[in-house]
Image: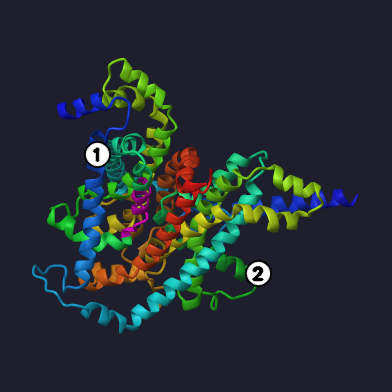
Amino acid sequence: MAVKHAKVKSAGAAQSPLLGAAMFGPALVYIALIIGGPFLLAIFYAFSDARIGSVHLHYVGLENFRSILHSPAFHQAVQNSIVFTLSAVAIVVICSTILSLALEEPFRGRGIIRFLILLPWVAPVSLGTIGWKWLLDSIYSVFTWILVSLHFFTIYNAPMWLGQPHLAMASVVCVHCWRLIPFATVVMLAGSSAIPKEIPEAAGIDGAGFWRTLFWIKIPMMLPIINVAVLFSIIFTFTDMTVVYILTDGGPFDSTQTLPNLAFATGIEGSDLAAGAAISLFLVPVLVVVAYFMLRMAHRAEVV
Amino acid sequence: MRGNWRRIGARTVHVLVLFVFTVLLAFPFYWMLIATFKQNLDMYKTDNNPFLFNLPPTLENLHLLFFDTRYVRWLGNTALVGVFVVVITLLLAVPAAYALARLTGNWGERVGIVIFLTYLVPPTLLFIPLSRVVAELGLQDTIWSLVVVYPSFTIPFSIWLLMAFFKSIPKELEDAAMVDGLSRFGAFVKMVIPISVSGILTVVIFTFTLVTQDFVYALTFISPEANQMVGVGIPIFLVRGDVYYWSSLMAACLIASLPIALLYNTFLDRFIAGFTVGAVK
């Protein structure tokens, strides 16, 4: 402490790297230990035969990757993860753009409407998903009740929302969108409030109609913030396992199995740590791409 | 005349869009509210209109939840973990953010962005190795495993939020304090922290809500029912055999969600400012 003190005095009000390092160090060490360390350990496990309960582990080279790449469940999970992510992100971006435009201007009751709209994002994810599990119940689903009362189905041939492969995937995507739309909407609201109002107004005075102003002026000006929403949505969707685990746990017949859920099923429930770690490493390429685009965006913001 | 119709049309569409989205997004919570007070005979009869109370409302489900399950214990565990994680996060993130904002010069900004990116490393990538680390530390099946691991995602985002906050404080304040004889660190403790209360409060709320949002780590590290967090206890343990106590489940979800949602909602704009990564200036 005394050493630091002297350093500060000599540096005066200017920057003091030593004190900076002392204040920043503990956080850095913690992050390195809890994120960096386990990340390296995941890579190490992926090349070993680690299992829950066994003490010794051996280097097995690419054996885990070879057996994963040959497993049909893995192929299915990759395919499902891609479908899950692309469809959810597309729906989220379209819906949240519309919703953020609708919420842009102040109106009476905006506060309460915003709170209701935000509920899915601010409530704990597993609890909201449980609500959906009841809404999509095979017998007591309210949607089934509505369809039956409108005579689209009888109670005996009603759709099983989580029990039929395509329908289950659609349900999982919808529930995930339900959770992400509020988040993407507030991100976009933050962006659209930064756009100077004069420009769309001037376009209106010059005779540009609503759609023209929207597609040629407003949306292009919102693009940077839409990009932010897209990048976060990709990460939150591709790496999510809560919604899938609670609603279907990958079923029926692996039709909603995604990479994170398969990693959990293999590594923790199946005790095969090595294979589970290898599967979860397939999340990394997507993370790297998203991180690259975020860095580029942050860099551009710094330069401008 | 034509313009008038247009305006009415635009207004109708506006109201309609808001109405549809609000109903779709809030509906599950409304459904939880109804289910909370429904009798079982009413819940499990497909002929009944599910939107109505076909039998008189009851408090029995709440009674079951609070007295015959470990719900209260789970809420307590969650609060306890939240408090510890908040303390660890503040102790590490506040000085680190200040260092990056003020003391480390140009590369502080860049390190800040790298720190922010670690927030994006998902639990689903780390839970397998961390499950072994937790076991080695002897913390398996206790809430202390979560107290150790949760700061790994609360610290990075908190540093990022606080960095922006500290930068908005005029440097002259600290300079003046140092001229008055305080050291740099003294100026940080006595000047900067007191005027940063609102930024620090944001971090407290954010950390607490993130703790309640986690599912993966709590599911992986903890198996005994009594030591669970509320987010895992409800979906995993409130299911008895093949019988779901749906009414009590829905009550449990609603009661745990609302306070967190209210808190989070109050501070939301600040978190979102953090999420926009400088795309908004």
Q: Which residues are magenta?
A: B112-123
Q: Main SS of the magenta segment?
A: helix
| Identity, as a three-letter code, of the amino acid under mark 2 | Leu
Give the Cα separation between the discs numbered 1 and 2.
Answer: 68 Å
Q: Residues within 10 Å of mark 1 (few under 14, many from 20)?
A: some
Q: Residue at x 60, y 55 (%)?
A: A97
The answer to whether A203 is drawn above or below residue B46 in the figure is above
Q: What label sits on residue A150 in the rendered view?
A: 2
Horizontally, is B237 left or right of A82 in the view? left
| Identity, as a three-letter code, of the amino acid under mark 1 | Ala
Residue A176 makes an appearance in the image = yes
Horizontally, is A106 left or right of A49 in the view? right
Q: What label sits on residue B150 in the rendered view?
A: none
Q: Residue at x 13, y 57 (%)?
A: B136
Q: What label sits on residue A21 in the rendered view?
A: 1
Of the numbered discs 1 and 2, the one sitting upstream in the chain is 1
Q: Residue at x 19, y 68 (%)?
A: A45
Task: Give percent across and percent down for residue B111.
Answer: 34, 47
